[in-house]
Amino acid sequence: MGIRAKFNLLMVVVTAVGVGLFALAADPLVNAVAREEVLQSARIMMDSAGGARKYTSDQITPLLKDRLQHHFYPQAVSAYAAKRNFDVIRAKYPDYSYREAALNPTNPQDRASDWETDIINAFRANPGKPEIVLERSTATGQFIELARPIVTKPACMECHSTAASAPAAMVDIYGDANGFGWKVNEIGAAQVVSVPLRASAVRAEHIRHLFVLPFACFLVVMYVSINLLLHFVVIRPIERISETAEAVSMGTLETPEFNYGAKDEIGRLSASFTRMHRSVVEAFRLLGQG
């Protein structure tokens, strides 16, 4: 096995070990970055829902306030606006979902499930906590849940204090058993965005691919560069020295000297061989004269 083959074999082994160690060290970082990117997308969705809520409560509800006693307009409810806004996102990403889960909702469909109730109670126990992130297993797979608390504002009491003071049109639709008895500044609900965990896995795989292509290109450039350097700096000079030595040993004294010129190890070897070459030629010349 020649020097080039031995050197490349060593490079392959070292590269394989290096890539393995790099993958082992980088994998948790890649997964964390991908998960954070997915969470950031969920936060943007949450902020979008919050914008729809604010716009509705500030600009739509006041316009319809006088009509709500005679006819209930769900468009006047900020939660309704937020959910309809999210429907646009859900049309493209059907596995994503948005809920405004409440302990005592007007619409029974918004009643908090067991795990959503735990989130609301966690917000109640820690009023200053801005959000909760957790992973949850479902029948359709793993999900990342991003939740933020909903604090009851004075304006909410117009519909949620008592059934008697609520818009009659709303009571006619939903009844007088649910959605009342709320208190100002109380955390009784939470916004919840659900994102499939596989979105994080897909993003992590994409990030890995972004790493692999430049890394593969780097390896190719490194192998080519090292092999060129090995050829011109080591192998080629040694082959020339070997050819010259073989010719001299066979008695071809007129063989031209090989002058490498560099001051590295190969250069010193070349200079030593040149001196030996001259000595052999001079010795044969003296023997011929004798």
Image: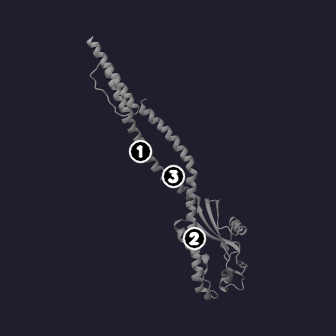
Q: How is the image coloured?
A: one colour
Which residue is pictured at 33% across the width and 22% down the height? 277
Which residue is pictured at 51% across the width and 54% down the height? 207
Quadrant that contains the C terminus: top left
Mark sitting earlier along the chain (3/2): 2
Q: Amino acid at mark 3?
A: Arg
Which residue is pictured at 50% across the width and 37% down the height? 13
Q: Alpha carbon of mark 3 to alpha carbon of mark 1: how far?
A: 20 Å
Mark sitting earlier along the chain (3/1): 3
Kindly give the residue lying farthest to the top in the view shown. Answer: 290
For label 2, count other residues whose C-alpha is less than 10 Å away and answer few (under 14), some (14-19) or many (20+): few
Q: In this view of the protein, can residue 198 be seen by the observer?
A: no
Could you tell me which secondary element the residue under label 3 belongs to?
helix
- Identify which residue, 15 or 42, lies in the foreground: 15
The residue labelled by disc 3 is: 208
Q: Alpha carbon of mark 1 to alpha carbon of mark 2: how far?
A: 46 Å
Q: Position of residue 179 (x, y in %)?
A: 70, 78
Could you tell me which secondary element the residue under label 2 belongs to?
helix
Could you tell me which secondary element the residue under label 1 belongs to?
helix
The residue labelled by disc 2 is: 47
Question: Which label sits in the foreground, 1 or 2?
Answer: 1
The residue labelled by disc 1 is: 221
Q: Position of residue 194 (x, y in %)?
A: 60, 64
> In the picture, residue 60 is in which quadrant?
bottom right
Q: Position of residue 103 (x, y in %)?
A: 70, 72
Question: Which label sits in the foreground, 3 or 1?
Answer: 1
Q: Is residue 21 above or below residue 134?
A: above
